[in-house]
Image (cartoon, helix red, strand yellow):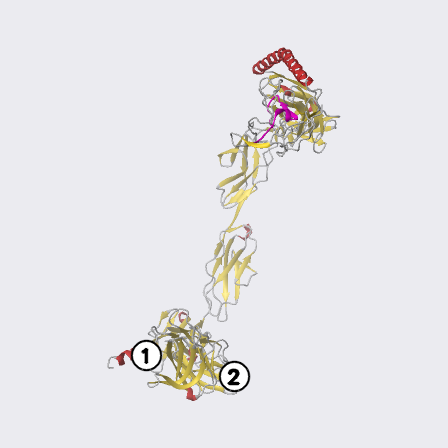
């Protein structure tokens, strides 16, 4: 008994537990408050393959009962049939029997706080899984997650998170910042997974230094009548650089202030020489605490004139007696761990203009360009009036800038000016010189060669000018062909071309001046000579009128003469060449010639093509008209046509179409039967023509002649043997007639005896079997046996071969004689019927002679009688 108890416990454990653990995925703890809902995302995996869930029970605050060996507690929901989800009751199962175990509880009570147990079974497998519910009376506050550091003007993302989410719940999270009248825009997201159940709102904004110390609140709202449910508030710690404020005073003037809160600088401070000026810089905010603060002038530190008060967070700069050198840009700069900030103020010291100078935008200036002259004089305030002088002569100009829109040589010289402001008038300084430069003047090109200039001559050109500032440094040429500059301004053109364009040259310093183009008027032989087809417009047909014209592109001199040549032979003089009715014989290569006093030019050969229908067709035979049989004969249809013949047709001596459309007709090998006349037809798109017949003779080869001779000798021998054969046949016929004379008094009937395929051997002689010799058959004798039925007086007997025969009482009692005359054995169903193939004529005859009066019964062996009528 002591040994059985542990064994029973082990069996019970195996029966009520799993060999493998179930796998559940769901949040460990879920949060909610009374009156809302809970959505429990849940998934499970049953150990083993192909198993499904049989039962699911939801317990509240379950516990293990040792007596029943099972769990007990308040059953919130039980699912046994999974075909139709149950949507009734406070607890709803939204899963299935395979992998989904999602639950929805609505509404939630405070008593739901604690543990939920999911008891699941599948066949003999059981499992209990725990889910913790944290239910409060009111909504818990959200959590605000701040970054480790917040700096001014740097974008940050703040998160407000609530560990709650449920489909159908109308909650939302809103942000508010102290000092603002509207809610901040944010992005809200909800997570309902087996890992996380939460509602989150993310706020993205750029904090300013003024947000430092302000309260930021995240509120949980319900769109229903509940309104605000809970909230969380944090205080912002915005790191920022020091923020400054400047106070300026001089003499008994009013104090002027400026600060860096709005990032603006103080207005310009205007003082006069020898005034006293005090500038005070104060820090109004800094996080973290500032570490240093200094004054600068034009970027340089001013330590000797400033006083720093660390406790009051101020730095004071005092200037007891200012001069014009004290004017400039002053700024206060403070530093902390985040960065630095500076605030600037401009100090102006008024004084009269200093001696002025003239600034020229471009000097030396090119003639024709735009020139600006500026009067420069240091003064405060700036000058308001100017006086200009050209070569010490005052000119009517009072502006600071004197503009010359189009400068000429007369504008060259010295310029000076005077400046005046509210304090006084300055003095004229050193004058500035305006140097006006220009390109070479009156550039021309001169031809040295005498006239006229012919194609291929060498030409010398000179480039001249009258004046230049600065001096000419080089020459440029506008030429073509081969040329060489033998010295500056002198150019030699070697072998001037016939189409030389006008030439030009330029004399250059900093700029170039071009001479007017000069035409050389080069004389040359006619150019571009060619033949033009005037009419017809396109193709030329035989019999139509045709007009050709000799054309050329240019000639200098222009007086020319025209000539025509055909295939290199002179035809006529004149520009036009006409044909009233052109013929194929007019086709050929035509050239026209044009000459002037310089030379003669010939056009390229112009091919005149005349289109006409086929003509002069003839058949040529290769290798010759007489060909031995077995060789090759090639017949060619030769023609004269333009365009060439596109379709050929061949005919023989019977005018029969040979259905051959090539230009050549090949007979390979040629036969004697091919001898005869052949002719062809040819056609193009303009018409058709045919050739005269041409005779092809094919003669026998030596081999064929030998065969023919042998055949003739055979025929000759056959003719000699025919009389001998006739004599033999005549003798045979006489023997037949004599045999037939023996039977003239008998009543005879002629018949054919059918041969039954299987030839029987002749039976032993009996009383009713008779055979007769046929005297006509000399070389072969055939016997036909006819068996008659037995008479009443006949009795059968057994022969030696075991066959049944009928014994005749006596030969005299037999009333019939049967015989057959057969010349030769036949191959057919009837021995005496001539087959389809021709054979030598012979006599086939059978006769049945009735010698007695009595009738014989019909044969039992199917003998057929056929009457032969002569």
Report the residue marked by disc 2: 223
Would you identify the image quadrant in which residue 454 lies? Answer: top right
Badge 1 crowding class, 10 Å Cα cut-off, few under 14, some 14 to 19, many 20 or more, is: few
Q: Nearer the viewer, residue 526 or 370?
A: 526
Residue 728 in picture, x, y percent from top left: 63, 13
Residue 178 within the magenta-colored segment of the rendering: no
Report the residue marked by disc 1: 12
Q: Which residue: 51% across, 34% down?
A: 490
Residue 85 seen in render? yes
Q: Quadrant of the N terminus?
A: bottom left
Residue 720 in picture, x, y percent from top left: 62, 10
**Vertical order, 45 against 502 (above or below):** below
Q: Nearer the viewer, residue 586 or 838?
A: 838
* Residue lying furthest left: 2
Q: Secondary structure at mark 1?
A: helix
Q: Does residue 438 appear left or right of residue 282 in this picture?
A: right
- The magenta stretch is 805-827
């Amino acid at each position: 008994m002591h040994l059985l108890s542990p064994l029973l416990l082990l069996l019970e454990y195996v029966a009520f537990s799993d060999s493998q653990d179930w796998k559940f995925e769901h949040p460990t703890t879920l949060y909610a408050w009374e009156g809302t809902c809970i959505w429990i995302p849940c998934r499970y995996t049953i150990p083993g393959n192909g198993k499904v869930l049989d039962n699911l029970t939801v317990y509240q605050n379950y516990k293990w009962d040792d007596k029943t060996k099972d769990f007990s507690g308040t059953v919130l929901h039980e699912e046994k049939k999974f075909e139709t989800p149950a949507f009734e009751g406070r607890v709803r199962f939204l899963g299935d029997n395979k992998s989904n175990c999602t639950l929805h509880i609505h509404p939630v009570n405070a008593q739901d706080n604690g543990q939920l147990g999911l008891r699941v079974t599948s066949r003999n497998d059981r499992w209990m899984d725990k889910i913790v519910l944290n239910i409060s009376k009111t909504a818990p506050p959200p959590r605000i997650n701040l970054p480790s550091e917040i700096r001014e003007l740097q974008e940050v993302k703040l998160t407000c998170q609530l560990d709650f989410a449920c489909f159908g719940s109308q909650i939302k999270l809103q942000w508010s910042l102290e000092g603002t009248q509207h809610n901040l825009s944010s992005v809200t997201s909800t997570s309902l997974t087996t890992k996380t159940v939460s509602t989150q709102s993310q706020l993205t904004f750029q904090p300013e230094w003024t947000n430092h110390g302000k309260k930021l609140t995240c509120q949980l709202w319900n769109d229903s009548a509940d309104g605000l449910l809970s909230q969380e508030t944090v205080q912002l710690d915005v790191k920022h650089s020091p923020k400054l404020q400047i106070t300026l005073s001089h003499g008994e003037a009013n104090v002027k202030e400026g600060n860096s809160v709005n990032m603006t600088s103080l207005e310009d401070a205007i003082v006069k020489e020898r005034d006293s000026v005090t500038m005070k810089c104060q820090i109004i905010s800094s996080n973290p605490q500032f570490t240093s603060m200094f004054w600068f002038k034009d970027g340089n530190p001013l330590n000797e004139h400033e006083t720093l008060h660390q406790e009051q967070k101020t730095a004071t700069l005092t200037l007891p007696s200012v001069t014009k050198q004290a004017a400039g840009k002053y700024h206060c700069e403070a530093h902390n761990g985040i960065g630095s900030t500076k605030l600037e103020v401009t100090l102006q010291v008024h004084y009269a203009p200093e001696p002025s100078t003239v600034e020229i935008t471009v000097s030396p200036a090119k003639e024709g360009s735009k020139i600006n002259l500026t009067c420069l004089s240091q003064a405060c305030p700036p000058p308001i009036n100017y006086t200009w002088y050209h070569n010490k002569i005052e000119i009517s100009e009072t502006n600071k800038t004197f503009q010359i829109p189009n400068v000429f040589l007369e504008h060259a010289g010295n310029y000076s000016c005077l400046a005046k402001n509210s304090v006084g008038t300055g003095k004229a300084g050193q004058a500035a010189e305006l140097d006006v430069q220009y390109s070479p003047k009156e550039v021309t090109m001169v031809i040295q060669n005498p006239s006229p200039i012919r194609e291929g001559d060498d030409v010398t050109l000179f480039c001249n000018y009258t004046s230049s500032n600065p001096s000419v440094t080089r020459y440029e040429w506008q030429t073509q062909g081969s040329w060489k500059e033998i010295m500056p301004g002198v150019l030699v053109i070697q072998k001037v071309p016939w189409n030389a364009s006008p030439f030009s040259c330029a004399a250059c310093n900093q700029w170039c001046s071009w001479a007017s183009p000069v035409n050389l008027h080069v004389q040359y032989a006619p150019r571009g000579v060619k033949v033009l087809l005037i009419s017809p417009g396109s193709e030329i047909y035989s019999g139509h009128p045709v007009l050709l014209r000799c054309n050329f592109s240019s000639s200098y001199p222009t007086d020319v003469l025209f000539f025509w040549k055909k295939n290199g032979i002179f035809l006529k003089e004149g520009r036009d060449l006409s044909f009233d009715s052109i013929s194929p014989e007019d086709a050929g290569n035509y050239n026209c010639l044009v000459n002037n006093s310089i030379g003669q030019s010939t056009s390229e050969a112009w091919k005149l093509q005349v289109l006409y229908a086929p003509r002069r067709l003839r058949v040529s035979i290769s290798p010759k008209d007489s060909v031995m049989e077995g060789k090759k004969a090639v017949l060619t249809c030769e023609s004269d046509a333009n365009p060439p013949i596109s379709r050929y047709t061949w005919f023989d001596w019977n005018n029969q179409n040979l259905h051959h459309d090539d230009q050549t007709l090949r007979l390979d090998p040629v036969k004697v039967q091919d001898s005869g006349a052949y002719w062809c037809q040819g056609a193009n798109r303009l018409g058709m023509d045919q050739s005269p017949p041409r005779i092809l003779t094919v003669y026998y080869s030596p081999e064929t002649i030998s065969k023919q001779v042998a055949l003739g000798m055979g025929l000759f021998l056959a003719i000699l043997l025919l009389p001998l054969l006739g004599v033999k046949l005549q003798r045979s016929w006489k023997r037949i007639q004599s045999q037939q004379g023996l039977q003239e008094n008998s009543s005879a009937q002629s018949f054919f005896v059918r041969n039954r395929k299987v030839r029987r051997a002749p039976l032993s002689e009996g009383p009713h079997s008779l055979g007769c010799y046929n005297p006509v058959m000399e070389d072969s004798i055939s016997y036909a046996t006819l068996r008659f039925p037995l008479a009443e007086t006949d009795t059968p007997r057994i022969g030696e071969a075991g066959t049944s025969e009928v014994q005749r009482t006596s030969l005299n009692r037999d009333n019939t004689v049967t015989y057959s005359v057969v010349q030769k054995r036949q191959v057919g169903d009837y021995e005496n019927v001539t087959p389809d193939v021709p054979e030598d004529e012979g006599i086939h005859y059978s006769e049945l002679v009735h010698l007695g009066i009595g009738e014989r019964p019909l044969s039992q062996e199917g003998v057929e009688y056929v009457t032969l009528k002569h």
